[in-house]
């Protein structure tokens, strides 16, 4: 693995397999009473979050602690960020404190890539703008593989605001590397045709029924109103045409699972019944987030 | 004071000259172009093996003075121009204050007279403060030395204002230069809208944002009969529409930048702001259309859009970085490598694009070696090997994607009013 983890696109398939296998080792630990290892004892990880995040930041913090590392979390408010310091100056300051890795979330696509060119500290991308969210795709793959033998040939429908979704991009890259069939679905204004060229095995549709038909996995995306810079679709019609309801699930494979990166908006991108549906694995995703991030941290600074 | 440039291959498209000859300049004026010229006490420049051409004109630069001298000054920009083989440059009006009055135009002309090593011909604003609403003092700026009007980076969105600007400019004999971009279509965009922007999660600037503005303006040019020039043309449709308008007899011209004929969006280093400019680097198909337009004559001039920004502004998140790259020192090298070497255009055509082409738009009385004219000469080589080190640039800024590139062919010496203002070390 290179110095950090910036995205899935540039990762080798073998690298991904190694992380997923290691994450599986960490899964049983999550339910033990003694949850702490000392693999990363003495290591320091800085979580730098320029965007609001509860689950990803907490998940990285817990993962670091379970590996025995120390973790500090910094959020944009209450730091020098609000005093007008530039991103590169902030990161240089943090790097001078010699952390072993910086976990970073930023609203600007490519912010961690830009910093990685100028900093010696490994950077782990915890979501950059509308570009990638690599640990989300890894935990999603772990969650699918807990229920399926392989990703090869699996049909995965990803539904929602694809244009603005870093979760979708990272998942497309990962699933494609393993030979899955990927159907991206959303309103036309949020589904640029160039997405079909993102990776092999991707096709696009604006029809949710077509997307779900024969799907083995249905990934719903959060409607990211904060990333909409314009009214790209009439919000009042969103649930009617792109909200996932129980009757849609009849079109999918009988064992199809429903995933969501969270936080969910009941009644906006999926109905409350679907959120509580027995084959909804949303909470398993959260649990796997810790195991996967433990594996990532171990690989980068272990 | 005189200089004789000996034994070079003289290419002067205006007089259809292409032969080995000497060029004699006396008292800042071309005194003759012929074999075996000499003059007692004349300085001799041996140009054997080199091309000797009329002084190159860069009709689109940003010198940042007054107001942004930390990025560039008239003096530093003029030295970068000289090192690129340019003897005349035309600064856009987006200074602080905006060049929208005779006072600012006069300041630039006067400052250039004292400090610049090349000729500086300012371009005045179309509207006051380039705000797009009220027309600037166009006639007064012309009297003070402005050679064209443009709101460059802030295109005139209001069609009625643009119509009036064209009417006035026509009556003053000035061309109207437009940075063609529909600001509603491009709002928030950071790079060309296409496969690369979707892959990198960056907001796109669609080609259509350029196309609709070119289409609107060509209709207004037809309505008003004004001379209209498309700055830094970058899309296939825009090139096609300009070609169509010219075929219909409209007084329409266009320029292309070296970066648009050299690079495509997929060749960018991701999130490196040295590849961020407006219009953005387009897809390979658009790049090819620009090259084809240069070859066919739809595009008359190569202009750099030299846009200095200090490192602190370019060292940020991509979406926060300002648009623009410096370009005068690399323009000729890129044109030789990307256009002449692959056989897309002849050397003579290349010289036209830097001389008679911009001259046809601006009417400066330059761009030729005819005796009696200004003693501006660009001497270049088609085979000198050199590497561009942006840290050695004469510009005050360092924002170039061509740092470290090794070129075959480039400027050798620049002569302004009979004086060698730069020569390759």
Image: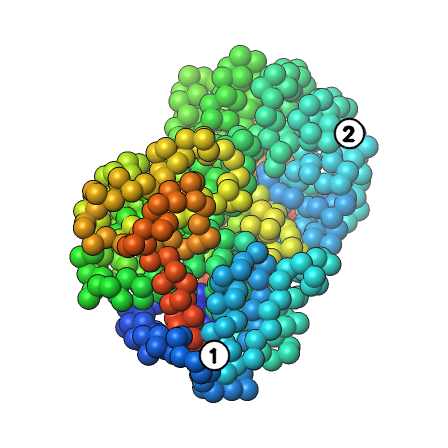
Subunit that carries the residue with mark 2: B
Q: Is residue B349 above or below residue B385?
A: above
Residue at mark 2: B101
Residue B265, image x, y percentages:
42, 49
Q: CA distance from mark 2 to mark 1?
A: 67 Å
The answer to whether residue B128 is visible is yes
Residue B24 left/right relative to B124: left
Relative to the observer, which residue lies in front, B386 or B282? B282
Residue B112, image x, y percentages:
75, 44
Name the secondary structure under disc 2.
Answer: loop
- Give the foreground label among 2 and 1: 1
Mark 2 and 1 residues: CB-CB less than 8 Å, in contact?
Answer: no
Residue at mark 1: A66
The answer to whether residue B284 is visible is no
The disc at residue B196 is: none
Residue in the picture at 37% in, 49% down: A275
Give neighbour class at mark 1: few <14, some 14-19, many 20+ (Cα, 10 Å): many
Q: Are marks 2 and 1 on the same chain?
A: no
Relative to the observer, which residue lies in front, A72 or B259? A72
Residue in the picture at 63% in, 72% down: A94
Subunit that carries the residue with mark 1: A
Residue A276 left/right relative to A44: left
Residue in the picture at 41% in, 55% down: A261
Residue in the picture at 41% in, 35% down: A238
In terms of image quadrants, where is residue A159? Answer: top left
Quadrant of image for the C terminus of chain B: bottom right
Residue B416 left/right relative to A294: right
């Amino acid at each position: 693995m290179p110095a950090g983890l910036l995205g899935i696109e540039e990762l080798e398939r073998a690298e991904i397999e190694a992380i997923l296998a290691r994450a599986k080792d960490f899964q049983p630990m999550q339910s033990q009473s003694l949850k702490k290892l000392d693999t990363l004892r003495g290591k320091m990880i800085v979580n730098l979050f320029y965007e609001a995040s509860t689950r990803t930041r907490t998940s990285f913090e817990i993962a670091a602690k379970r590996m025995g590392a120390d973790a500090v979390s910094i959020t944009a408010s209450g730091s020098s960020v609000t005093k007008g310091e530039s991103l590169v100056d902030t990161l240089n300051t943090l790097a001078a404190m010699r952390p072993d890795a910086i976990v970073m979330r930023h609203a600007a696509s490519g912010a961690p890539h830009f910093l990685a060119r100028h900093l010696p500290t490994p950077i782990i991308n915890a979501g950059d703008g509308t570009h990638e969210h690599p640990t989300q795709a890894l935990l999603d793959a772990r969650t699918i593989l807990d229920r399926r033998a392989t990703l090869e040939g699996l049909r995965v429908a990803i539904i929602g605001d694809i244009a603005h979704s870093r979760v979708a991009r990272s998942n497309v890259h990962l699933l494609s590397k393993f030979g899955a069939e990927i159907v991206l679905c959303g309103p036309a204004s949020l589904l640029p045709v160039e997405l079909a060229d993102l990776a092999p095995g991707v096709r696009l549709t604006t029809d949710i029924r077509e997307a779900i038909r024969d799907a083995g996995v249905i990934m719903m995306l959060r409607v990211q109103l904060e990333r909409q810079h314009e009214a790209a679709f009439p919000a009042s019609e969103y649930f009617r045409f792109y909200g996932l309801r129980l009757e849609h699930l009849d079109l999918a494979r009988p064992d199809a699972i429903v995933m969501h990166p969270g936080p969910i908006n009941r009644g906006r991108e999926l109905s409350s019944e679907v959120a509580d549906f027995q084959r909804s694995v949303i909470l398993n995703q959260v649990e796997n987030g810790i195991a996967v991030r433990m594996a990532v941290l171990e690989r980068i600074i272990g | 004071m005189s200089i004789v440039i000996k034994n070079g291959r003289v290419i002067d498209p205006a007089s259809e000259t292409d032969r080995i000859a000497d060029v004699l300049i006396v008292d800042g004026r071309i005194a003759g172009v012929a074999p075996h010229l000499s003059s007692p006490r004349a300085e001799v420049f041996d140009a054997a093996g080199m091309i000797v051409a009329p002084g190159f004109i860069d009709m689109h630069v940003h010198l940042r003075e007054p107001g942004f001298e930390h990025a560039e000054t008239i003096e530093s920009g003029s030295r970068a121009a000289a090192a690129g083989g340019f003897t005349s440059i035309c600064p856009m009006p987006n200074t602080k204050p905006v060049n929208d009055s005779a006072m600012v135009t006069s300041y630039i002309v006067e400052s250039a007279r004292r400090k610049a090593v090349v000729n500086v011909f300012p371009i005045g604003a179309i509207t006051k403060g380039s705000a797009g609403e009220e027309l600037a003092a166009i006639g007064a700026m012309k009297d003070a030395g402005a050679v064209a009007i443009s709101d460059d980076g802030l295109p005139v969105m209001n069609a009625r204002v643009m119509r009036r600007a064209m009417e006035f400019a026509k009556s003053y004999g000035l061309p109207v230069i437009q940075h063609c971009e529909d600001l509603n279509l491009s709002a928030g965009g950071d790079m060309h809208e296409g496969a690369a922007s979707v892959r990198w999660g960056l907001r796109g600037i669609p080609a259509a944002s350029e196309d609709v503005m070119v289409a609107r303006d060509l209709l207004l040019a037809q309505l008003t009969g004004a001379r209209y020039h498309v700055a830094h043309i970058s899309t296939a449709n825009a090139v096609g529409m300009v070609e169509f308008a010219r075929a219909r007899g409209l007084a329409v011209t266009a320029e292309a930048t070296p970066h648009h004929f050299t690079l495509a969006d997929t060749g960018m280093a991701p999130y490196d702001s040295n590849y961020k400019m407006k219009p953005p680097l387009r897809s390979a198909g658009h790049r090819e259309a620009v090259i084809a337009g240069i070859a066919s004559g739809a595009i008359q001039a190569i202009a750099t859009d030299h846009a200095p920004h200090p490192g602190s502004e370019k060292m940020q998140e991509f979406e926060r970085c300002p648009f623009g790259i410096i370009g005068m020192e690399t323009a000729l090298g890129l044109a030789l490598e990307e256009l002449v070497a692959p056989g897309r255009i002849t050397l003579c055509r290349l010289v036209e694009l830097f001389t008679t082409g911009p001259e046809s738009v601006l009417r400066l009385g330059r761009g030729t070696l005819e005796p009696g004219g200004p003693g501006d000469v660009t001497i270049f080589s088609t085979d000198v090997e050199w590497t561009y080190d942006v840290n050695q640039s004469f510009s005050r800024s360092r924002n170039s994607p061509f740092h470290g590139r090794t070129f075959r062919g480039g400027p050798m010496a620049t002569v302004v009013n009979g004086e060698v203002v730069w020569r390759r070390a």
